[in-house]
Image (spheres, rainbow, N blue to C red):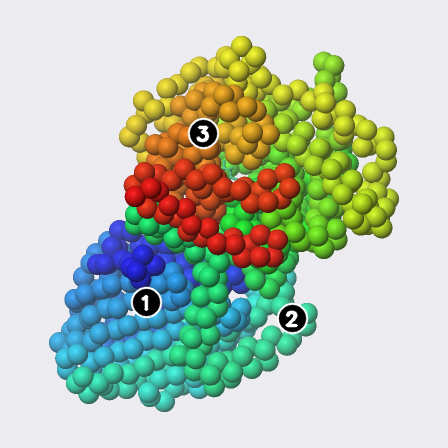
Amino acid sequence: MRRLWTLEEFPFHPERLNHCETLFTIGNGYLATRGTFEEGYTGELSTTMVHGIFNHAKGVLVPELVNSPNWLPIHLTIDGTPFRLINQNVTTLNPTGGAVLGYRRTLDLYTGVLTREVLFRAESGSIVRLVFERFACLHDDHLMAQHVQIVAVDGTPVIEVDSFIDHRVSNNEAQHWTDVAVGGAGPRTQVITRTNQSGYTLGMAAHLIAPGAINTVMENGVALSRTHFTLQLQESADLYKYTTIFTSRDLADPTQIGGALHQKLDEAVAEGFSHLQSRHEREWAHYWDTSDVQIEGDEASQFAVRFTMYHILISAPRHDDDVSIGAKTLSGLGYKGHVFWDTELFILPPLTLTQPKLARNLLMYRYHRLAGARHKAQANGYEGAMFPWESTDTGEETTPQWSDVQPDGSRIRIWTGDSEQHICTDVAYGVLQYWRWTGDDEFLIKYGAEIVLDTAVFWGSRVEEKNDRYEISQQIGPDEYHENIDNSVFTNRMVVWHLSEALKLMEWLKSHASTDAKRLTDALHLTPERLAKWQDIIQRMYIPFDLEKQIHIQFPGFFDMEFIPVPHYEPRTLSVQAILGHSRSIQTQVIKQADVVMLMALLGEELASMPVLLNNFNTYFPRTDHGSSLSPAIHAWVAARLGLADIAIDMFEHAGSIDLNDNKGNVRDGIHGAACGGTYQALVFGICGLKLDANGELTADPQLPSHWKSVSFNVNHRGQKKHFRFTNPA
Ligand code: BGC
């Protein structure tokens, strides 16, 4: 059913402008462009984000992914009336002079093609039907295509067209571009510009095809491709706009960018829109061949798993292993395009299981940033590699130290860059999970092992031997409401996991790749003494646990704080932290997101027996306010494993609809990438119980919600595509 592949907006909802821009983002793993409109509006958040183009602008605390020139603009005038859905003031519905008679926008998730149909009456009385289509070619990183069909439904309208690339863009107020060179001739225009601190050159060129003669006109420093023509009654015209893009990340010699842009435009014009579209759609069909999950009996969940997978796929780099996916994917300015643990523990697993080549690219991004991680370790007095909590192109720590100014004028100190050190085990987890599922020994031996081992070296130097055991002070676990605590059970236990995996990995390397084992031993100084210390840490690490209650303790002292019954604070759109205020909530037991429950998801029964896991869940679930979008999916996963079917489906539905529903009103900043990846994991690892056993074989233990008929999907397991279908008894 095609319907369950289609995101639709009908009629137009101006009050949801920014929310919908995020949802209707298109992309091809090289760039993504929000669903803003060709004619442009005040209040829109128009962005095109290109992987890897970071810049640290004056007046901004940290580097950020740069908003690139806008390639969408096509301005139409019908008999002198500008085509607009709304006035400049986005809240008014009546466009100057004209009238919008009908509107529908659809994003076909199966093909990645965004379509908008509008029936519009000009002041003259002429009525036109406009169909806008656009896609970012999946088969070609550097090419985007647009089509506008204009049908004269009533009257003989004169159509005027201005098409251009708008370089007058910023990230909010921050200006990142300098040395802008704008030019054009006939149907072509181009912009070449450079980021003002990092020095990346970016070029874009566009070619317009239209019925009338096209001239380039310079207006306000922008090169417009301008044309006009008249339509007879019932006649239709087609406009095509192709845009190409190259940056100095693609071409070592930036002076070649102009040539590359025009060569690609020549090819696109020669090939034509429908051929390009077929090639693009064929690539998408390949993606869905392995990445689709089918749910029978629950249309909302079916749509949600496709929508969330679509957003992962459009942001996953295909041909670049030096970039990674930020917390808000490429779909908005939120979190400044920075890469967090969201990538390795939330977004990566669906790619590991369904698109291993894309997963490998993301892990290589971390490999290429080991120098930055070593630098952070050294700067903090440690050994090995300490990945930054927030990462950009340099690999240096880029977490801001201070928040934006609060309503009362103050700024809050952000400690995550200092203290959320569990990122080091999260990256290692992503590497080993990828290796186990794919069997990609070459990756592990050449690259992955170094990540796992050098982050283990970091932990070996980071732990503190005191109180006759090992401890780790000053941490932030996944629950960021409690800052700079000692002995986060999540962190301490994951360090034990990490070090024991590192020791097993050394043994594996010695027997399967002895030269590399020696290379790494020498390079990372993996002396017998160091390995013996790892063993000692594994045995003597402090794991906070309440013997009487048989539960893990999130950190010592947690249960001494004020208890707040989180379920009483419903219904709410704010987090309980926001309701209570920052300074009060840090002194309560309110938890931001899955923390001990996250540990349970990652380690399962390796962590504890089923009764203890259940005790943990029953303890921590009612204390969690899901202030982070990362939380519901993990709860769904764990609840399903514990047989808590109602909670599992409730949390699963919550996770899958975070962006679609926008209950918290922050989707304007971008898609919650981790919630998207978490939704897949909740389904596949949680509800279907898919896992690898000790021998690396696949096992499943489905616990389908009672109203579902079936779930089917494919996964890649050690180079082979395996199909699963689980059904509920009829
Ligand atoms: C969450 C983190 C997450 C970050 C980026 C925060 O609100 O607490 O776990 O990494 O957002 O998504």
Q: Tell me where residue 708 appears, x and y as whole percent.
A: 32, 44
Q: Closest to the observer: 290 or 327?
A: 290
Give the answer, above or below, for where 641 lies relative to 151: above
Residue under label 2: 251
- Depth check, mark 2 against mark 3: the one in front is 3
Residue extending furthest top? 548
On the rendered structure, is 153 left or right of 526? left
In three-dimensional space, the C-alpha distance between marks 2 and 1, rounded to whole angstroms, equals 32 Å
First in sequence: mark 1 vs mark 3: 1
Residue under label 1: 115
Q: Tell me where residue 479 appears, x and y as whole percent.
A: 51, 29
The quadrant where residue 122 appears: bottom left
First in sequence: mark 2 vs mark 1: 1
Give the answer, above or below, for where 516 lies relative to 415: below
Q: Residue at x 24, y 86 (%)?
A: 230
Residue extending furthest front? 730
Residue under label 3: 642
Q: Residue at x 26, y 51 (%)?
A: 15
Give the answer, above or below, for where 444 lies relative to 610: below
